[in-house]
Amino acid sequence: MNFDLSEEQQMIVDSVAKFVENDSPVERFRELRQSEQGWEPQMWAKMAEYGWLAVAYPEEQGGFGGSFVDLALILEQLGRGLVPEPYIPSVVLAGGLISKFGSSEQLERYLTPMIEGRSSLALAYAEKQSRYNLNDCLTRADKSTGGWTLKGQKVWVLNGHAADHLIVAARTSGEQFDSSGISLFIVDSDAPGLSRILVKGMDGQRSALINFDGVEVDADRLLGEENEGLAPLEWAIDRGAAAACAEGQGEISEMFERTVQYLKDRRQFKVPIGSFQALQHRAAEMFAEVELCKSTMILAAIQADNEDAGTRKAEISSAKLQLNDGGWFVQKYALQLFGGIAITDEEDIGLFFKRLRVLNGLFGDADYHVDRFQSLERFNGESI
Amino acid sequence: MNFDLSEEQQMIVDSVAKFVENDSPVERFRELRQSEQGWEPQMWAKMAEYGWLAVAYPEEQGGFGGSFVDLALILEQLGRGLVPEPYIPSVVLAGGLISKFGSSEQLERYLTPMIEGRSSLALAYAEKQSRYNLNDCLTRADKSTGGWTLKGQKVWVLNGHAADHLIVAARTSGEQFDSSGISLFIVDSDAPGLSRILVKGMDGQRSALINFDGVEVDADRLLGEENEGLAPLEWAIDRGAAAACAEGQGEISEMFERTVQYLKDRRQFKVPIGSFQALQHRAAEMFAEVELCKSTMILAAIQADNEDAGTRKAEISSAKLQLNDGGWFVQKYALQLFGGIAITDEEDIGLFFKRLRVLNGLFGDADYHVDRFQSLERFNGESI
Amino acid sequence: MDMSFTPEQIAFRKEVREWIDSALPPEIKRKAENGANFEHDEVMEWHKILYRKGWAAPGWPEEVGGPGWDVAQRFIFGEECARANAPTLSPFGLGMVGPLIIEYGNDEQKKRFLPKILSGEEVWCQGYSEPNAGSDLASLQLRADKDGDDYILNGQKTWTTHAQYADWIFVLCRTSSEGKPQQGISFLLADLKNTEGIEVKPFLTTGGTDAFSETWFEDARVPQENRVGPENEGWTMAKALLGHERTLIGGVAESGRWLAATKRIAASTPVGVGTLMDDVAFRRRIARLEMRRRAVGMANLRILAAAQVGRAPGPESSILKLAGTEVYQAITELAMDAMGHNAMGWFDSPLEALPEPQQWIASQFNYLRACTIYGGSNEIQKNIISKVILGLPNA
Amino acid sequence: MDMSFTPEQIAFRKEVREWIDSALPPEIKRKAENGANFEHDEVMEWHKILYRKGWAAPGWPEEVGGPGWDVAQRFIFGEECARANAPTLSPFGLGMVGPLIIEYGNDEQKKRFLPKILSGEEVWCQGYSEPNAGSDLASLQLRADKDGDDYILNGQKTWTTHAQYADWIFVLCRTSSEGKPQQGISFLLADLKNTEGIEVKPFLTTGGTDAFSETWFEDARVPQENRVGPENEGWTMAKALLGHERTLIGGVAESGRWLAATKRIAASTPVGVGTLMDDVAFRRRIARLEMRRRAVGMANLRILAAAQVGRAPGPESSILKLAGTEVYQAITELAMDAMGHNAMGWFDSPLEALPEPQQWIASQFNYLRACTIYGGSNEIQKNIISKVILGLPNA
């Protein structure tokens, strides 16, 4: 048991922090909000050069053999700058799935260029009716001569508007809610029959609504086992939730630190407002939540690599609940303590607020994770 | 629409407040906690003399033809002194049922002596397994030659240890959870086969666990219609909940006012602790909850006489939720602001705290009332 | 005490309900049923319809154009407007400067301003806050220097809600720098459209809308006759107005609209084979807020009934601001939760991705973070309660 | 960063679990399984069993009798004790004065006191608060005047937890009235049983138990050799001790015991044809608290791991006090809710009315209202965080 950062990890943290400060402060995101793509390929390439896209993949795949904790440390720093490049969809979700379940050919075709910053990926899993239920899948993949034909629709595909390749969850057998029968396919985003509608999000980031109108995919595009895609999908979304906690930690910390600074700077009634005890106590309560978020985020990141699904789910759900509840406390009161200025689009604090609210709903909201936790076997056993 | 007290109502409030101040301050309850009965028949007789036991019954029954609001106003003041006489069990619950559903003979035999302060009543409805479900009834009343034979057990019978007569809910047909088949009987507490176990409560008040081991009751002891006892029981328990809100209002107000006074008197760091802004803000939040409790309590009292069960349930459940949630906020922070002394048995604030927690659980807790509210027809219709 | 409605009141409710149903223009009605956002023009259209009916200002005395309703009728009218999801009228004229002119204005002012406030012909906005005088309103610095029959105004107001649509602005300004900061403040009415030297710059909120503006005054001339009440005694009026604002901001009626929207969203959101409205735990969350909102509504009613007609509500209205805004925010938070993954969207998301009834939820959710801040932040309300009502000592 | 356990650690956990299972006396075990309350004698019996095993003071250095465990082992041991519902040892000797003597005491004091704290032969209590020095500890007034080799103590301490069972008391007292109130305080150890002029008066708590006492000093002589650290510098030690106390009071391990009890109650409480544990909404309420408790537990671990062995935790331990006590209280509140109508009862209710596992819940619920007050109230913790950690300015 050890919570210290290794020397390498400390170096990563420092370099990402420096990158945010010099190359991608919030101002950059503010400008990119107006653009179509929402992020910049050359910055993605730069991140690849630094090795941040490769860090957690095995060395034999061109990675550095790091752990999920490394990803979390990078994401936390990226969150501080609201860096809009598609790290979670491309590196954590889709890249993670290909790395873990892909054939060597798939690795080479899809993971390698992404690691090198030449392409980006996305995971298309949610459907209009599915909410957070991963087994709720209507998109179908029917056997065809050369492979499969995809029909259906996916929504809120993070980076779906820009990704070169998509991993698509589709039903190869069974009915809408069946656990088995879901398969994962790697689909080119320019495949005939595939159409994308750009969707701007509350947080200024982009996703896509994607229609699959008879998209043909070759047999070698199947990722992992046929009909057995749900477990990998759950694994990926779990890591997505842990990643949301990590990125969210950056935004929470930033909101909190900026709020404390504002309390010291802003004067009303002839004194700094941070001298008012009621606001001091609120700040203290926020500090406690920030620390609790940090603790659960670290634990979730550590357990994201755990092969025992029970442990992984318990810690990730706990962390996501803390992000959604404790983080909400911080984001809500950061705005309140900033006062009116926080409601203007010119002030950064609102940008962090919106991004956090989006992370809050991604990969399961508080109710979802509480419900998942209480359905774990261990909940009915020992409580400790 | 009018929220002003009538002249008569103001007189009642003043006289009960004076009674509490002179005859029954908290100190009296403190002493009675140690006694077996927990309350005093001579004080009950005095309350009868003042007319407080009669106020809400129709004039032809020997009452003053008042409304439930009158009961609420009395209870609120009694709550301020933690007066332990069995007003809710005897006047609101059992007395209310006899007044509304009793035959003229029953009125004369059971209501009249109670109104005159010569006897007290109780309502035995809860069972070990029933929690807050009024239809969950295992106690059986089987037809016998002269009437019925009662077998079963009732728990947490408020004033059950001292009451002269009990109203007992028992099943005359159907199975454990059936809505129909429950009947109400008036039973003498000294009937053969009836045994009572005195139970001291957290709040220092008394109730009884009562075993019915083949208790014979005459045919004329049936209150209301055979098998149709559930609706009257629901009506009575609803009014019990409204009464709990009214009494609780007295305790909440008392806790709040004493806390504000303490904030002005208690000095730490060389100043009154009420000069600390963080504590001021807490007090302000408590004030808001006290006022919200007061508002919902009044509305519930007004609607407790409403024949439309939907309106009655909606307002009473809203008030009980506010008592249980908002009241809890007040009671919790009253203790916190008093600090260590509040945890000693010598300080009154803890007595109010305990009584409020008991009221919180009586006649349905927060979850129960929220659940009831969302199952009302109107919840699915208009929300306003 | 009595909450029952007389046959006359029941008939009145029926009349109001039927009239609203027939009077709402089709497009507004469609939006109301959808829970969609109203444009400023639509709100003003509804204002004028109400004016023609004589119902634009339920709280005004009859002699200045109010309908002559008692508290019960006003309550019923408010309930029915909320029930119909009708647009909420702008409060600055009808709810704020109007009542203030009625109480403190001279006859000239009453004649000049009240009719056009009532008719909606002149739209008003509020000039209270300044960049360095937010919660600490008394430290405001907008200068008004006397010059002949005029004041010359120099300085800046911010959070002048809807100034871009307004014809007139009421401003608190400093006419003297002597004494305590509360002294030396006066209350002026300025013609926004026809005064040289006033510039309105709308800015975006985090809700993505331009609800607010900054308003700049540079040697702007305002006639002294447009001062309401005595010079240097504007603080009295400012406080009275904040009392009015607090009951308005509590937003009990408006929050009902969003609660209804939340139910509609939940009922149209599939979860498994049913909808989110079938999920007992989620129903309970809605129910809790609905019950809490009823509690605030009842407190509102008690306070309004206690305050005499025409008089400003006292410091106890602070609890409405506190509890009302919190429940209002909580309702928008719940609506966001109901939307699930759709809560990622924004009002400019394509309709394929975000159906119309959900389009404005996120914007409202963001914008309403302001309601615990404006009108005297909730922290300020707690100061008022603890000092004025509870009499707790100063530090 | 790494949370995985080595094979040695897994073996260690097994060893601890098996030993506790075999070492718990039958009656204590029965109570543990039932979630019932432990008497003082039972706690001391368990203390002595742990002592004989060498496990009474997991955090002490080996040279004074600690087991020589690292943070991970201590963590595992704590988890296993909580899992077994074993009695929680009194913290005043092992967790508070012991570590303080280890850090600040001289060799004589170490030799005299530590072995008997470890063995449980001498029971300790704490003399910190006074009736007029609660949150404002620095204003304490218990006087210690020098007389020859002794101090003569006059005054009063309150909230001296378990003083009626204790042999020794550690007191903060005033040895000088010069300078700031924090200066002039010294830290003394007094023999409760053998000092004339010390009187202990237990009083009832709202939990109905006599956990606390008031302790009166009237010309009570304490040898100067029983002073820990330099004269007039007791404040340093007081602060160090409060750091220890905060992590102890957070009560993460203890709250797990009551969470388990809540689950047992819910599983044995019929609701309709099932039990309360089948009610999804109630399960979620339990789950939420369990998840929150994990979060506090993880924060605890992070802080303990960061603090070097033997050193007192810093101001960041305030968050454990804050969040830990709140989750602890919330768990007892939930246990009360689980009991339904049984929550009306009291520990002297007859067993027919209230089954044994529910007998002590209400008492604990009431008593634990204190945990956000003692050890530096949660308001004081917020002061510490905002001043010491966040550096917010003074008023």
Image: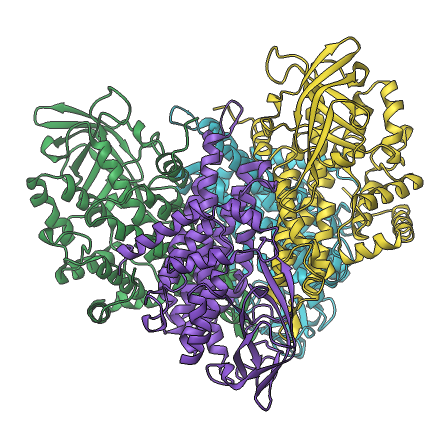
Chain colours: A purple, B cyan, C yellow, D green
Q: Position of residue C8 (x, y in %)?
A: 91, 46
Residue D83 in which image quadrant: bottom left
Foreground of the two, A113 or A271: A113
Residue furthest to the bottom in view is A145
Quarter of image, res C183? top right
Question: Residue at left 88%, top 18%?
Answer: C108
Quarter of the image containing the C terminus of chain D?
Answer: top left
Query: Farthest right residue?
Result: C52
Q: In this image, D261 relative to C36: left or right? A: left
Location of residue B166 with respect to C65 vertically, above or below = below
For the residue pair D105 and A18, the one nearer the viewer reads as A18
- Residue C210 screen position, x and y as percent: 70, 41
Inspect this view and state whether residue A252 appears.
Answer: yes
Q: Is residue B268 left or right of residue A357?
A: left
Report the side of B110 relative to B287 (left or right). Answer: right
Vertical placement of C21 versus D4: above or below?
above
Q: Is residue B223 above or below residue A354?
A: below
**Residue A376 image offset from top left, x and y in percent:** 44, 72
Q: How many marks?
A: 0
Does the rendering let one see residue D344? Answer: no
Q: Residue at point 23% right, 71% down?
A: D14
Comparing B367 with A92, the one in front is A92
- Identify which residue is drawn at 45% across, 69% down: A113
User: Which corner quadrant of the image does residue B215 belong to?
Assistant: bottom right
The reply, left or right, for residue D113 in relation to residue B268 is left
Residue at x 39%, y 48% (from the top left corner): A17
Q: Name the spot of residue B288 as percent of width and height, x first.
A: 60, 39
Q: Observer-nearest residue: A222 or C296?
A: A222
Residue extending furthest toward the top: C148
Please determine whether, in this image, residue B232 is positioned above or below residue A269: below
Please state, as top left, top right, bottom left or bottom right, where the N terminus of chain D lies in the image: bottom left
